[in-house]
Amino acid sequence: MLKLAGALMIILSAGGIGISCSVDVKRYCMELRLLKQMLYMLRGEIKYTKTPLQEAFTAISLRMPEPFCSFLRQTAEEMENLDGRTFGELFKGQIRKGLGSTRLKMEDLEQLGALGESLGYLDLEMQISSIELYLEQLEVRIRDAQESLAGKQKLYQSLGVAGGIFLVILLL
C-alpha cells in the first residue's frame, strides 16, 4: 500500500512538472503579445502625439501590467540622468534588470535592445520605422509560438506523466 501511494505521488509530481512547463510556454506567448501591445502604444505616442520618449514611457507604464510597467517606469526615471551613457546602453541595462525575470527568450530581449539603439537618436520617422520593423519581426515570433503552443503543451504534459511512470517502473 505504501509503495502504491509513493508511486502515485511520483506520477502526480512528474505530471505537475509537465503542467508547469506547459504553463511556461503559454506565459511566453502572453508576454510576447504584451510586448507587442507595449510597442504599439509607444508607436502611437511617438507618431500621433509626438511625445518625447521619457514622457511616452511614463504614460505607457500606467497602462501596462507588471513587469512591463516597472520596466517602462524605471527606464523613464533613468532617462533623467543618463550620466554620459547613450539611450541604447540605458535601454539594454533596463531590459536586463526589468525583463530578465520574464519568460521572454534571450533572442527576444536582444532584439528589443537593438530597437533601443535606434530609438534614442534617430528622427521621428526613423524611430517609427524601427518600431514597425520590430513589430513585424515580433508578429512572426508570436505566430510561430502560437502555432507550436498546443503541441508543446500536450508534449510537456505527456512527457511529465510518462517520465513519472518510467521512474516508478525503474524504482520498483
Image (tube, grey):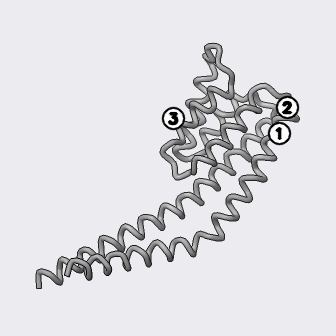
Q: Please tell me whether mark 2 sits on a helix, a strand or a loop.
A: helix
Amino acid type, mark 3:
Lys
Give the mark nearer the N terminus: 3 vs 2: 3
Give me the disc on residue 97: 3
Question: In the image, what residue occupies the spot 66% across and 37% down?
Answer: 113
In this rendered view, identify the residue nearer to me: 64 or 130. 130
Q: Is residue 87 above or below residue 126?
A: above
Give me the disc on residue 7: none
Question: In the image, what residue occupies the spot 80% across and 40% down?
Answer: 130
Question: In the image, what residue occupies the spot 54% across and 42% down?
Answer: 99
* Residue bearing the label numbered 2: 124
Q: Please tell me whether mark 3 sits on a helix, a strand or a loop.
A: helix
Q: Quadrant of the N terminus?
A: bottom left
Q: Is residue 12 left or right of residue 56?
A: left
Name the residue at the left extreme: 2
Amino acid type, mark 2:
Leu
